[in-house]
Structure formats: structure tokens, C-alpha cells
Amino acid sequence: MTNSMDATLATLNEQLRAKSDLVERYEAVRDIERKFKAAVVIQLQEIALGLKAEGRTWPQVGEIMGGVSYQRAHQISKGE
């Protein structure tokens, strides 16, 4: 899995570096950043909800998700 992700990122970087127009390249990087951040929010939300559905408490979910508070874990589950 990691090798696949690394390969994907390497390809993405190559494609970005191939843009000779730096303004176009900058805009593409920012667009990717926005899309990636949105995907991360969705993934974290699904994980938090999944952990809760497995029967874990919000404090347990928070601990698993990097030691965040139970309140923050609950916020993450709502996509916040």
C-alpha cells in the first residue's frame, strides 16, 4: 500500500513539475491541497464513526486518534 501511495505521489509531483507556467503550477498545487484536505476530513470522519460503531467510547476514540479530547473526537465524527 505504501509503495502504491509513494508511486502515486511521485507521479503527481512529476506532473506538477512539468508545468512550466509557475502560476498554473501554483494554482494546481493549491487545488490539490484543497481536495486532499477535504478527503482527509472525510476519512477521519469515517474512522471516528467506525470506531464508535465498534463500541468504543468517545474518550477511547480520541485516544486512538492521536490523543485528542473526547469532544474533539466527536467533532471529527461530524466532519468538523
Image (cartoon, rainbow, N blue to C red):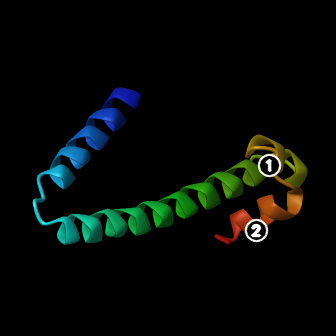
Category of crowding for the residue at label 1, using alpha-carbon neighbours closer than 10 angstroms: few (below 14), some (14–19), many (at least 20): many
Say which residue appears at 89% left-offset and 50% top-offset.
59
**Quadrant occupied by the N terminus:** top left
Say which residue appears at 80% left-offset and 62% top-offset.
72
Placement of 21 over or under 2, stated as above or below: below
Residue 45 visible, this orientation: yes
Q: Which mark is residue 61?
A: 1
Say which residue appears at 11% left-offset and 52% top-offset.
18
**Quadrant occupied by the C terminus:** bottom right
So how many labels did they put on this image?
2
Q: Is residue 25 left or right of residue 43?
A: left
Q: Estimate the x, y position of residue 32 in percent, counting from the top left.
A: 34, 63
Q: Give whichever of discs 1 and 2 has the lower sequence position.
A: 1
Distance Cα–Cα, label 1 vs label 2: 11 Å
Q: Estimate the x, y position of residue 42 in percent, counting from the top left.
A: 54, 63
Residue 1 visible, this orientation: no
Category of crowding for the residue at label 2, using alpha-carbon neighbours closer than 10 angstroms: few (below 14), some (14–19), many (at least 20): few
Q: Give yes or no for contact between labels 1 and 2 (Cβ–Cβ under 8 Å).
A: no
Q: Which mark is residue 75?
A: 2
Q: Estimate the x, y position of residue 35 in percent, counting from the top left.
A: 40, 66
Look at the numbered disc 2 and give the secondary structure of its residue.
helix
The amino acid type found where label 2 is placed reads Gln
Say which residue appears at 81% left-offset and 52% top-offset.
68
Where residue 28 sits, quadrant-wise, is bottom left
Q: Estimate the x, y position of residue 52 in percent, counting from the top left.
A: 77, 53
Q: Residue furthest top?
A: 3
The amino acid type found where label 1 is placed reads Val
Q: Which mark is residue 3?
A: none
